[in-house]
Image (cartoon, rainbow, N blue to C red):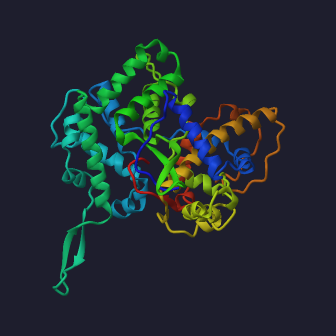
Amino acid sequence: MSACTSNPLPPSDEYIEFTRESCKLISQTLGFTPNVPSIDTFLLNLSRTSFEKIGKQHGLNFPLRFPTFTAEVNFLATLALLNGFSGYRTEFHQATGMGAYQNIVRLMMGLYISGSDAQDKMVGVKSLTAKGMSEITETRIVELLGVSVHEEKPHETLVGVTVGTRGGPMLNVVQLIVTTLNNVGKTLLSKKFESLGSYVVSLLQQVKTKEQLKNDDVKATDFLVKCIAETFAEFRDTHIFTQPNKDNPDSTINVHQVYLFKRIFFLLHSLYLRFGTNEDWKLPNTYKTLPMFVDNVLPTLCVWFNLINVPKIDTFSDKKRMIMMKNLIDWMQTQHCNSNLTRENLANLQNNISGPILTKDETYAIRASCLHVGQVMVERAKFLAEQSNFNTITPLQSHHNHKDGGVQQFNLEWLLDFNEVDLDGYLWALAKHDQDLRKIPRFVFPCIHF
């Protein structure tokens, strides 16, 4: 299967269901299926205290004052738009000492509070209006991030002399940020919206007033995801898997479409966390509707905990397809807790080491499989809770991969409320706060989508 540059959208209004089903299909087709015994071990040794403590840490508290509701929605929407670049984690750490998300938050804070920027009554600052986004420059982004888009190279003819030329690992990041903001700003202007926030608020108003949406969380979530994905190409976190056309070797045919929408899911959950209790807005309960928001952190943790099966050779219809997934399969076979990367070995690793550079097919295959694993983990959690009769189940042998070493009591009633969004938050926070798990090399695929 080869990478394809087009970004398909689901063929119906049921965006969440199509997302889940597309990821399940890829998981089953390629053999990256949920490892149920490992999932059960993980769940039975999961500390409720730890899960509930760090699973709610979504990093969405900002020391800012917003003049309007639209201004805060605008800030969260623009943050979600730029909440990608995980493939540049190592480069960000080398340039600034911080990871991708921390740098994007710092950039957003800089855009919002920059003293040299003109004020805007509706969104607080001109740079975050549609016009401001459409006009933002590389120089401004470089200044706010505090990075260089030049690198020193030896002069071609003068020995001992170095010259600065455009380049370096941060140039692509800066250019991608500028292009994304410029394009979204232009789209908003063409549709007569003054900001990304005003566009999102217009959608929330429809959710609030339309009878078929305001009392149906699933339909409201589908509606919001669909509108955002259709309007902005920059939010289309989707992919087409292709294979050679047997009737025409020079062409390919589409085999599977997969949808992930990580940053849209992040945005909707951000809005629910901030305004879900506000009776003035009928925000859908994202804890009940959304799958996980899959970047490269969650698959890395799922691989390390051995929650995803490594496909066997006979899973693939031909050797060529197997070879095209080789980097991913090699990584999965060796970089988990029961293989070369035990917790003891992690303690001796350096920080911020990059994992394998994956192809687009490999990237979407493992991300889709991870999203499906999240759904299966919720199903298994509820099953285990029901089977335990709340106090009779015996935990499976722990691999001692949870930092607390496993639970001390086995009342599993709490797993009845287990959901994918909290699981997402827990795994993401675990990768940030557990000093050993922070060292797990994460796969690399440079892009805006995650």
Q: Nearer the viewer, residue 4 or 72?
A: 4
- Image location of residue 353, percent across then percent down: 48, 66
Residue at 69% across, 62% down: 338
131 versus 432 height, above or below: above
Residue at 15% across, 37% down: 118
Q: Nearer the viewer, residue 84 or 110?
A: 84
Q: Nearer the viewer, residue 233 or 334?
A: 233
Quarter holding residue 209: top left
Evaluate whether residue 285 shows in this view: yes
- Image location of residue 199, percent across then percent down: 31, 27
63 versus 167 height, above or below: above
| Residue 283 left/right relative to 315 | left
| Residue 283 left/right relative to 185 | right
- Image location of residue 201, percent across then percent down: 34, 24
| Residue 128 left/right relative to 80 | left
Evaluate whether residue 422 shows in this view: no
Seen as rendered, the residue at the extreme front is 247
Residue at 67% across, 56% down: 315
- Image location of residue 439, percent across then percent down: 53, 62
Quarter holding residue 164: bottom left
403 versus 18 height, above or below: below
Q: How many marks?
A: 0
